[in-house]
Amino acid sequence: MTIPDGYTDLPTGKIASIVTYLEMRQPPAVTAESETYGWILTPHPIPDVDWYRGLFRAIGQDWLWFSRLQMSDEELRRNIHDSRVDIFALEFEGRETGLLELDRREMPDIELAFIGLTHDVIGRGAGRFLMDRALQIAWSHQPERVLVHTCTLDHHRALDFYRKAGFVPYKRAIEVADDPRVDGTLPRSAAPSVPIL
């Protein structure tokens, strides 16, 4: 496939990002246990769809996470109630401050489908704790690869964070989608650094 060099105008109401796909082909070297500082990872084997959407929105709104918010209840249940999808909430001081979703439906690959934190715990060690637990759980299933992807709409340190965790980029793509703030999926105040056109 050939993509021409240069700029491509987007229609009004669209957003675009560059997506980087990363893989890990062997478990990371065992390192000292990350500090827990009271973080608790709680499994949610059959999560309520409203609970899931609320946590998904709280974490992903400013990064324009929208895919799961646009699913019907039935479609979302099919995804998050699948026995091969593992969902966890990160709790701190009695509040849910993180989300981890591991997808084992494409074994022998496991995808870190969603991993994220609320703003108030970013930079406090929660990400390292969550990633350490994610990798322990993923590799316990003995996959060939653990996958994750990020995009230019994500936190500016996300790609570096994944690489430091041991992931290696292997593919890029351009994603174009309807702006979820235009159709009301997310509030117009979400992701203020990305202008609405």
Image (tube, rainbow, N blue to C red):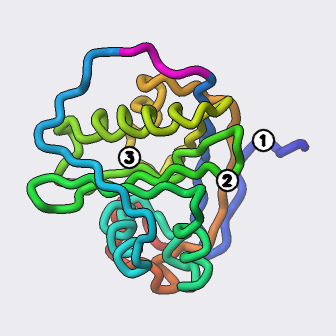
Q: Position of residue 166 (x, y in %)?
A: 49, 22
Q: Which mark is first along the chain, 3 or 2?
A: 2
Residue type at the position of mark 1: Asp
Identify which residue, 176 or 52, lies in the foreground: 52
Which residue is disc 1 drawn over? Answer: 5
Q: Residues within 10 Å of mark 3 (few under 14, many from 20)?
A: few
Q: Which mark is first along the chain, 2 or 1?
A: 1
Tally of numbered tags: 3
Is residue 187 found left or right of 3 in the rendered image?
left
Figure check: 14 above or below 145: below
Number of the label disc, if any, that sits on residue 155: 3
Quadrant containing the N terminus is top right
Q: Residues within 10 Å of mark 1 (few under 14, many from 20)?
A: few
Q: CA distance from mark 1 to mark 2?
A: 36 Å
Number of the label disc, if any, that sits on residue 105: 2
The residue at 61%/76% (across/down) is: 12
Q: Which mark is first along the chain, 1 or 3?
A: 1
Figure check: 164 above or below 71: above
Q: CA distance from mark 2 to mark 3?
A: 27 Å
Q: CA distance from mark 3 to mark 1?
A: 26 Å
Q: Main secondary structure of the magenta part?
A: loop
Q: Position of residue 51 (x, y in %)?
A: 34, 76
